[in-house]
Image (cartoon, grey):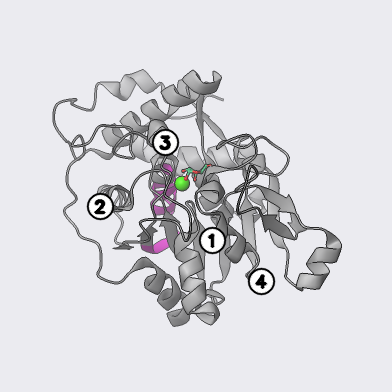
Amino acid sequence: MKMVLDMDTGIDDAVAIALALGSPEVDVLAITSVAGNAPVELCTRNCLLLNELLGGDAAVAIGAERPLAKDLLTAQEVHGADGLGGYAGSLPEPATSAVDEPAHELLARIPDEHPGEVTLVTTGPLTNIAMALRANPDCVASYERIITMGGAFDVPGNTGPVAEFNFYVDPEAASLVLNSGLDITLVPLDATTGAVLTRSALEMRKHARGLPADRPCRNSAAILHRALDHYMEFQFDESGLDGGYMHDPLAVAAALVPDILETLDLPVDVVTDGPNRGRTLRRSVQAHAAAAGRGVHVAFNHDDDTFRRLLEQRVLRPVFGATLPR
Ligand code: RIB
Ligand code: CA
């Protein structure tokens, strides 16, 4: 399976990269960065570092440094100042560099070169995808599948009361992409808040000694462990959750095992302004018919046993030597 990842590499994006690169049937052709959890230069650095440390040979391309219309909002309180749970300077510099091609051009070129063969998984704001659609709509339509983490329907938002972060940050891009007629599988908080990696499952403290606090180190287990530890601390302080939401790994898992998700085909609108900015709404049948748009496949549930098995076999065991409690 040829795959392209479009990410605002923060911590759950990092686990999603580990899952994709840990899947023997997947060839990750490219990872494109977009501003979201952290500024785009940090997300790009994190994509490069993880690609190197986890044995990938993906092309990494730099994406949008800000949303289509709104000012950038980051989530560094959740993902750390460096996007991976640490402080600026605590990560080694990557040994590789990003390609010269801008992300939105690469995102259109790859499906054009491999029509019907490539799966696109997006786990950040949809700015790059919207830019690619504006310039090359037919190329973007050549992806075999597009799976997008974003939105919230029947559960509270995580960025204000009703909005999910990726769609809050760039609601114009989300609206443009979801109403483009592309065949999209949407993985909203309704599904991802049921996908939790518990701290106890990882015996988090066992590895904490692995990362020297005073100098960067090129150890993927230590870097991912420190990242997850920060992410879980934040979740615990914010809501008492014992663990971290695996939003983005679930989107990658949906590419690996399509029937891991239970979906409904729905016409979806994204509110772009006002108190409901970023909110995803079921569009009325009349409005949908008038717009002649296609619905998207919205996931409202997932098979957690399959998800846990994928995480354990392809991330936790190879990276941490850890297994999940039975
Ligand atoms: O709302 C959760 C999403 O926003 C995840 O993709 C997380 O990484 C952030 O990008
Ligand atoms: Ca993300």
Q: Give the mark, 4 or 3, whose residue is nearer the N terminus.
A: 4
Residue 139 as seen in the image, left or right of residue 51: right
Residue 307 on image: x %, y %: 57, 41
**Which secondary structure lies at badge 2?**
helix
Residue at numbered disc 3: 316
Residue at numbered disc 4: 181
The mark total stands at: 4
Residue at numbered disc 1: 173
Disc 4 to disc 3, C-alpha distance: 37 Å
| Nearest to viewer (mark 4 / mark 3) | 4
- On screen, residue 106 above or below 166: below
Q: Residue furthest front?
A: 274
Q: Please, what is the three-letter code of the amino acid marked with disc 4?
A: Gly
**Which secondary structure lies at badge 1?**
helix
Q: Give the mark, 2 or 4, whose residue is nearer the N terminus.
A: 2
Q: Please, what is the three-letter code of the amino acid marked with disc 2?
A: Glu
- Residue 291 lies in the magenta-colored region: no
- Span highlighted in magenta in the image: 15-30
- Residue 17 lies in the magenta-colored region: yes
Disc 4 to disc 1, C-alpha distance: 14 Å
**Which secondary structure lies at badge 3?**
helix
Residue 92 occupies which quadrant of the picture? Answer: top left
Q: Give the mark, 4 or 1, whose residue is nearer the N terminus.
A: 1
